[in-house]
Image (cartoon, rainbow, N blue to C red):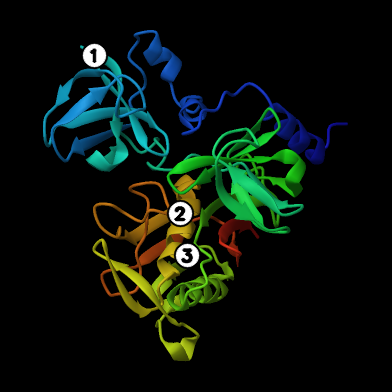
Amino acid sequence: MITRKMIMMIVLLLSLSGICAADTGTSLCKEEFSFEQAKAGVSPMILYTGVTTTQLTMRSGPDKNSEGLGTVKEKEVVQIFGFDQVWLFCWREDVGAYYLGRHNVVEITPVNDSVPAYGVIRNRYVARTSKATKLYGAPSTTSEVLFEIPADIRFSFWSMVDGWAIVPYRRLVGYIHVTDLKDLEPVAPSVDYARNGDVISVFTTFYSTKDTELNIGRMENIRVGCAYIAKDYKPGEKFDFNSIAGPYRISRGYLPSPVLVDGETVAGYGGGTCQVSTTLYNALLQLGKGINIIYRRPHGPGGASYAPHGVDAAVGASNLNLIFENAFPFSLQIDPTANCGVLCICLRKV
């Protein structure tokens, strides 16, 4: 008899092969979309449209120095069939597939209701570090170290290839060797499949651990913000980040720290809570129709650098908030952890 646990292990084993990852994550992301179809010169399934912010060169590869294939005009509508951490995969009949930088295209909208929300590649696993380890810039211990992670820190990642866990890191992709992992938990393949307590979505962001007064305040604010939102939310219940985690005052446990306002960094109380709301927002985006996003605002044109461009969620003012409704027929548990520069938010079915 095939048990549910056996099925989860089969899903895990299948993820260990068949995907080729590049340093920017482009090759892995291509697997998510109809890139092979586009490569063959056949029109791929267009998922989104967007509007350019300026005149742009259509690049032949995910590199600003790659060959130019022509230009698109300012405020031109472009067709998008995929994306990675930095680039949009676009299509034009007279050109074929080409690349544009994510930061140069706005108003990115799904072409219909059946298309998932733009901006996030699904994180499929949660694990903890079994020992102090390094997040490398390529699948090699001789490559650049992007981040150092102590033992017993929880994080999520896309997939595993040739013994490496592939981890979205800021607007890049990092690698951790699977021998440095423990407590590996696959994300449920669907909400209907999930049982009580299962992780149905997860996202991780990284933050500085510098020992400066303002950054110490920011780290504490991230921890405090996580503590306020960590609870179960019933079917039909609305989540209002500012109402739940705010007001952002010293009496609520918040400390002075850098705050990003319209792309500018200023000092204020509660800095760091935007990273909590952004991490939560990215986890919510992976759930689809079970979550109704009622209100969300980005930080500004550049967004927040700790998340992929276009998917940040600013909080802290009347016009900066994250509000959503749990439209699932079950309670949704927000399960966050923030330790040693790693903020991981799991969403569980309860």
* Quadrant location of the N terminus in the rendered image: top right
The amino acid on which the numbered mark 2 sits, given as a three-letter code, is Ile
Residue 287 on image: x %, y %: 50, 48
Asked whether the residues under the numbered discs 2 and 1 touch, taking CB atoms below 8 Å apart as contact, a structural biologist would say no
Q: CA distance from mark 3 to mark 2?
A: 18 Å
Residue 138 appears in the figure: yes
* Quadrant location of the C terminus in the rendered image: bottom right
Q: Residue at x 36, y 38 (%)?
A: 113
Q: How many marks?
A: 3
Q: Helix or strand or loop: what does disc 3 sit on?
A: helix
Residue 207 on image: x %, y %: 50, 60
Residue 79: name its quadrant: top left
Mark earlier in primary sequence (3, 2): 3
The amino acid on which the numbered mark 3 sits, given as a three-letter code, is Val
Q: Is residue 309 left or right of residue 29?
A: left
Mark earlier in primary sequence (2, 1): 1
> Which one is in front in this view, the residue at disc 3 or the one at disc 2?
3
Q: Is residue 63 above or below residue 247?
A: above
Residue 339: name its quadrant: bottom right
Q: CA distance from mark 3 to mark 1?
A: 41 Å
* Residue tagged 1: 95
Q: Is residue 235 above or below residue 202?
A: below
Label 1 crowding class (10 Å Cα cut-off): few <14, some 14-19, many 20+? few
Label 2 crowding class (10 Å Cα cut-off): few <14, some 14-19, many 20+? some
Residue 35 on image: x %, y %: 42, 19
Q: Is residue 230 above or below residue 39?
A: below
Label 3 crowding class (10 Å Cα cut-off): few <14, some 14-19, many 20+? many
* Residue tagged 3: 276
Residue 240 appears in the figure: no
The amino acid on which the numbered mark 1 sits, given as a three-letter code, is Val
Residue 305: mark in rendering: none
* Residue tagged 2: 291
